[in-house]
Amino acid sequence: MFSLKDKVALVTGASQGIGRATSLALAEAGAKVAVAARNADKLASLVAEIEAAGGEALAVPMDVADAAQVKAGFQQALAKFGRLDILVNNAAITRDTLALRMKLEDWDAVLRTNLTGAHLCIQQALGAMLKQRSGRIINLSSVVAETGNAGQANYVASKAGLIGLTRAIAVEVASRSITVNAVAPGFIETPMTDPLSQELKDKMKAMIPLGRFGQDREIAAAIVFLASDEAGYITGQVLGVNGGLHAG
Ligand SMILES: NC(=O)c1ccc[n+]([C@@H]2O[C@H](COP(=O)([O-])OP(=O)(O)OC[C@H]3O[C@@H](n4cnc5c(N)ncnc54)[C@H](OP(=O)(O)O)[C@@H]3O)[C@@H](O)[C@H]2O)c1
């Protein structure tokens, strides 16, 4: 795999699922990792796992929807590691229901966490990256940003918004050798998708050309690649990792 030796990463939504797998993969590639989420206990056990494997990590408990907590979290990571090379905006929630019935609070909560949260983290990360004149920002979008999905207007809008945010920031910071890309997973087996009914899972699996759901480590591998020096000429792009679900 690609080497991230001497790099420092911050991953949001690191307490479980794709964010956890990504933190482990970044650490395995040699990066020091600040792991951020709201659940401090889960972060502590992730830090212990990374350290037990010989890596370096820091738990940064924070809510990405809260600007003051985001600022404090980045300050904590920068105080510990002294620089920031890689930001993975992975934290997200769902509040699924049909648009007609969707409460404004459910719309706001999803947009605030998934899209505004990424914006707040990017603002904090750019302070360090612009000074360093280098950096990698990777935003977790979704295949549904391009296909749409009934019952997920808020989530789909947030994930499509992240693609726009990715392109806008990519152009804004390119002159400082900072790249900004999105990874758009298809259906990945994580705590986010576990609660879906077996009927829905069977229906979705039948639509995936590779005939199986993805694993969190397969998204992590794409993120490690985009974070690497070797991906330095890729910016403003959306990398689909979806088993061919959206092959067009
Ligand atoms: N699984 C899939 O099939 C799939 C498909 C397409 C895209 N994605 C995207 O991939 C990313 C990871 O998904 P996943 O399946 O791993 O989800 P997940 O298992 O539900 O994990 C979401 C993570 O986000 C954190 N989080 C939620 N709200 C937060 C907040 N306000 N502040 C800080 N952290 C917060 C959660 O930790 P705490 O509760 O501890 O805060 C958790 O660690 C998401 O962006 C998701 O939209 C997933």
Image: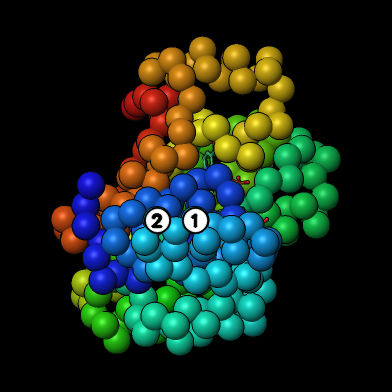
Q: How is the image coloured?
A: rainbow
Depicted 82 relative to depicted 45: above or below: below
Depicted 45 relative to depicted 145: above or below: below
Q: Amino acid at mark 2?
A: Ala
Picture residue at 66% right of the left edge, 50% below the top: 93
Q: Quadrant of the C terminus?
A: top left
Q: Position of residue 211 (x, y in %)?
A: 43, 15
Q: Position of residue 38 (x, y in %)?
A: 67, 64
Q: Position of residue 112 (x, y in %)?
A: 65, 63
Residue under numbered circle 2: 53
Residue under numbered circle 1: 49
Front residue (pair 100, 53) = 53
Front residue (pair 47, 88) = 47
Q: Is residue 52 left or right of residue 2?
A: right
Q: Position of residue 203 (x, y in %)?
A: 59, 15
Label annotation for residue 99: none
Quadrant of the rendered image containing residue 122 = bottom left
Mark 1 and ligand 1: say if the CB distance to the nearest ligand atom is below 8 Å.
no
Mark 1 and mark 2 residues within 8 Å of each other at the beta carbon: yes
Q: Is residue 90 visible?
A: no
Picture residue at 64% right of the left edge, 78% below the top: 69
Q: Categorize mark 2 by other alpha carbons within 10 Å: few (<14), some (14-19), many (20+).
A: few
Dot 2: element? loop
Quadrant of the rendered image containing residue 56 = bottom left
Mark 2 and ligand 1: say if the CB distance to the nearest ligand atom is below 8 Å.
no
Q: Is residue 69 visible?
A: yes
Picture residue at 80% right of the left edge, 55% below the top: 104
Q: Amino acid at mark 1?
A: Glu
Front residue (pair 49, 200) = 49
